[in-house]
Image (cartoon, rainbow, N blue to C red):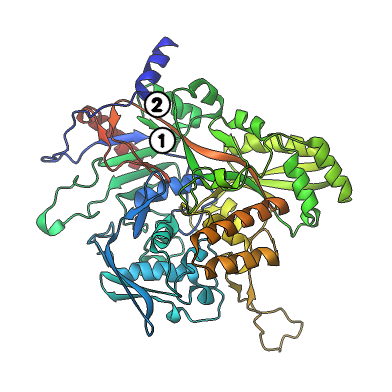
Amino acid sequence: MKKIMALILCVVMLAGALASCTTLEDDDKGAVIDVYLTNEIYDFDPARGFNDVSTAKFLSLIFEGLTRLDVDGNWEAALMDDYTVSQDDAEGFKIQINLKATKWSDSVPVQANDIVYAWKRILDPEFKCEAASLLYDIKNAKEVKLGNASVDDLGVAAIEIDVLEIEFEKKIDLDEFFTKTASPALVPLRESIVSTNPNWAKKASSLITNGPFDVKRIANGSNIRLERSAYYYRDTTEDGALDEYVIPYRIITDYDRGDLSDQLEAFLTGEIFYLGEIPLDARAEYAEYANAYDYPATHSYLFNEKNELFAKPEVRRALSMAIDREHVVEIVTYAKAATGIIPPVINGADGKSFRETGGDLISTSADVDGAKSLLRSAGVNGGEFTISLRDDEVDLAVAQYIKGVWEELGFTVNLKTLRYSEDLNDSTIIIDNYYTSYINGDFDVIALDLTILTSDAVSALAPFAKEYSGYGVNMEPEESDDPEADEVYLYEERGHVSGYENEAYDELFDRYFETDDAAERESILHEAEKTLVDDAVVMPVYFMQDSFMFSDVLSGIGSNFYGRSFNSTKMKDYMSYKDIDESALQGAED
C-alpha cells in the first residue's frame, strides 16, 4: 500500500518544466504516450452525441473551429485569423473572416467552404441537431431550418478560398457570436468526405480531421490511436518543424486492457501515464489525489411526455422531488448536487456564474412525502416504465439508486442499458443504440449528460422551444389508405425529443432572438430555466466534474473548456519507452 501511495503522490504533484527533447532528429518523431482518455467512442461526428461528455472531451482533440474556448469559457481565435465588419442600409450587418492557412489530416487545405458546408448541414430541415439555434443570428438561418427558405438563401458564403462572409439578420454582439462558433458542433467538415459516406465518422480510414491530432486507428472501439497531425498549421512548403504546434507524436488508448479497474492498475504500475476516468469503487480512496474540475454538463433524466404516465408535470415533479441529490454525489464522488439545469461553470452576460445569479431552483435533499402528495393530487398511484442509459458503471449506479426511490413511490421501474452493436452488413461499423434511441425519442425516461454546447446557457435551453429544437421539419409523406392517391407532405415542425410543448416557453426564445439587450437576454434565459424546472420535463441530478490523474513523467497537459489539451505535453525520457510501445503497436495491428 505504501508503494501505491508513493506512486499516487508522484502523480498529483504538478511537474515543473521537464527536460525533454522537442527538436526531432533522424527517425525520432516524438513521444508515444499510453493513456486512458475517456470512455469508448464509436462515432466522431461533431454534430452528434452531445449527451455524452466523453464525446465532447475527444472532439476538441481532433477538430478545430473558427474559435475555441479556454478553460474559463472565453473565446479565442482558432481557425479565424482576423475579421472585418461592414454595415449599411443596403447590405445590412456583415463580417468577413480571413482563415489561417492549415490543412486537413490528408493534406487537403481547409477552406471557407468547409465551414459553409458544415453549417448548412446542421441547418438542413431533415438533419436533427440541437446546435442549430446557435446559428440563428445568421440571415435566414431559422427559416432554412424550418423549411421556409432555401439553403441558398442562408447568409453564409465562401467569397474566396480562405475568406468566409457572414450576413446577419441585424447588428449583433460579435463576442457572443464568436463564443457560439467555438462550439465543437460548429467545426468545419469536408463535403466530399461526409456526404458520400454515412459512416465517415466511425472509421479511421474515412475520418478526416483538422485539429491537432488525427485518428489513425479505431479498432471496434477497443483501440484508438491518435497521432500528431503533420498538417496542423504547419507550413509544409518550408518544411516547418513537425512538433512546432503539437509535441507528442502518438497517444494510444487501449480498451482491451480491461475495465476501469484494470486501467487504474495499469496506471499505478506505470503502463499508462494518464487516467481520464477513475473507477467508481476507487473514487473515494483517490479523491484527494485526483484532479477534478467543474465540467459544462449536468447529468440529467429526460421524461418522454408522449408516454401518458408522464403527461402531467405534477408526476414528473414528484419523481424529481423524491431524489436525494446529495446521496447521488456520494455515489459519484466527482460531482456537485444539481440545483438547476445550468451548471456553475457557465457564466452570464455580466461575467458572473449563471447558476449563482439564478439561485437554487431545486432542493438537493429528498422530499418523499411531498412527492407522494403530488402523485395523489395528480391521481397517479403507480405505473410501469423503463429508464434507458448508456453502458457506463457510473450511470448504472445512479440509475439503480433512482430506480429504488421511484419503486418506493409505487412504480415498477426497469433499467435498459443501451449498448453498441455491430452492423450486420459490415462488421467494422458500430451502431450507437443510445444515440439513436435518444434522437428518435424512443424511450420512457433516459439518462443523459446535458452538455452545454457553448459557454452560454442558451445552447442548453433553446432546444426545448419548438422552433429552436434543431429538429427541423418532418418531410415524410402523410399515410393514405388510397394506394392511388398523390403523396401529401405534412412539413410539420419537429419539437424536442421529449415531446415538450409550451407556447409561453416558445415565446421566450422569440423574444431572446429579437432583442439586442444582453441583460434582457440573460433575464429571459433565467425565466426559461425556471420554467423547465417547474414543468420538470428534464430532471437535473448532478453537476458533472472532469476527474483525472497523470504521472510525473508527463508535463504540459493543458486544459480547455471541454477537457484536456495535449498539444504541449512532454514526456520525460520518452525514448526509453518507445521500443516497448512500437512493439506493442505492431502486435495489435498483426
| Residue 103 picture quarter | bottom left
**Relative to residue 532, is residue 562 drawn left or right?**
left
- Hey, what amino acid is under mark 2? Phe
Q: Secondary structure at mark 2?
A: helix
* Residue 461 visible in this rendered orientation of the protein: yes
- 204 w.r.t. 153: above or below: above
The residue where tag 2 is placed is: 267
In this orientation, which residue lies closer to the viewer: 359 or 63? 359
| Residue 186 picture quarter | bottom left
**Relative to residue 242, is residue 352 drawn left or right?**
right
Tell me which residue sits at (83%, 45%) in the image.
374
In this orientation, which residue lies closer to the viewer: 518 or 41? 518
- Hey, what amino acid is under mark 1? Tyr
Q: Earlier in the sequence, mark 1 or mark 2?
A: 1
The residue where tag 1 is placed is: 36
Expressed as whole percent of the image width and height from the top left, the position of residue 125 reads: 54, 73
**Relative to residue 325, is residue 521 drawn left or right?**
left
Tell me which residue sits at (55%, 55%) in the image.
460
- Mark 2 crowdedness (10 Å alpha carbons): few <14, some 14-19, many ≥20: many
Numbered badge on residue 450 = none
* Residue 220 visible in this rendered orientation of the protein: no
Expressed as whole percent of the image width and height from the top left, the position of residue 182 reads: 40, 56
In the rendered image, which quarter contains the N terminus?
Answer: top left
Residues at discs 1 and 2 in contact (Cβ within 8 Å)? yes
